[in-house]
Amino acid sequence: MSVAIRVIPCLDVDAGRVVKGVNFEGLRDAGDPVELAHRYDRAGADELTFLDVTASSGNRETTFDVVARTAEEVFIPLTVGGGVREVADVDKLLRFGADKASINTAAVVRPDVIDEIARHFGSQVLVLSLDARRTKDSPVPSGFEVTTHGGRKGTGIDAVQWAREAADRGVGEILLNSIDADGTKEGFDLEMIRTVRAAVKVPLIASGGAGKPEHFPPAVEAGADAVLAASVFHFGPDDAIAQVKKAIREAGYPVR
């Protein structure tokens, strides 16, 4: 592996504030997105992801004013998701300062939107946000089911098959988030990462469950090209990003 592993803080935003919960529930305030973005940029983050976590469930647009103010504070790539439904939404996000757009619910509802966005802007601007959970009640071949609306709704769609289809349709990378591990601080779902990694060749961002620097190298070993987290950065020490990079580097993987 020669490409440097990216370390990406995630800003889950609701009503203009960064929030964090467990399994997408019990959200608590974690700060101002603009201030956090500035802090993480200075602390050495490789990219930043901004997700408006209630845009789809609330059937509204992303809070573009907050996106614009956040973009002004960072000099690293900024991915924005939440409420992205069509080409026009991506166009607006890019004009407000985003470098990439993340899509989830709308792509599940109408997969052709992936083709349309990739054709219009190129695959490099489109990230599939794939929120998956282990399931027994709704059996799917891989054991991992796609959810939408911020993890609130099951779909009966197999996560691995969906990842493969989205990659074939033109997404540039996949943000794979474990609903079960989200916010638990007990480590990434390594089996999920390995399973999706075996199915797709596009870059894979692992998300959900990181609680300490030691949790990150196993995700890279499982096949992640980038690692994304929230709690460990929002509520951890000021040098948390540096500690994560040190852990990854000491495990033998290149970082910036």
Image (tube, rainbow, N blue to C red):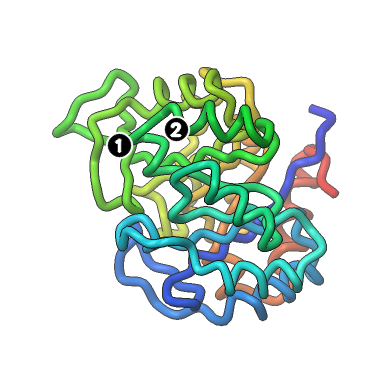
Q: Is residue 99 left or right of residue 146?
A: right
Question: As displayed, is residue 236 above or below residue 255?
Answer: below
Q: Is residue 97 left or right of residue 205?
A: right
Q: Residue furthest front?
A: 88
Give the Cα separation between the discs numbered 2 and 1. 9 Å
Label 2, residues with CA under 10 Å away: few <14, some 14-19, many ≥20: many
Q: Which mark is residue 134?
A: 1
Question: As displayed, is residue 97 above or below residue 28?
Answer: above
Label 1, residues with CA under 10 Å away: few <14, some 14-19, many ≥20: some
Task: Please tell me which residue is depicted at 74% across the width and 54% down the height of the picture.
Answer: 77
Q: Is residue 125 left or right of residue 72?
A: left
Task: Please tell me which residue is depicted at 78% across the width and 55% down the height of the picture.
Answer: 246
Q: Residue furthest left?
A: 137
Task: Please tell me which residue is depicted at 51% across the width and 59% down the height of the picture.
Answer: 51
Q: Type of residue at label 1? A: Arg
The N terminus: image quadrant = top right
Q: How many marks?
A: 2
Task: Give percent across and percent down for residue 84.
Answer: 47, 49
Question: As displayed, is residue 25 above or below residue 156?
Answer: below
Q: Type of residue at label 2? A: Met
Q: Quadrant of residue 224?
A: top right
Q: Secondary structure at mark 2?
A: helix
Q: Is residue 64 left or right of residue 141?
A: right
Q: Quadrant of residue 191?
A: top left
In the image, 198 versus 111, the foreground residue is: 111
Task: Please tell me which residue is depicted at 53% across the width and 22% down the height of the picture.
Answer: 169
Question: As displayed, is residue 50 above or below residue 136?
Answer: below
Q: Earlier in the sequence, mark 2 or mark 1?
A: 1
Q: Secondary structure at mark 1?
A: strand
* Residue ID for mark 2: 192
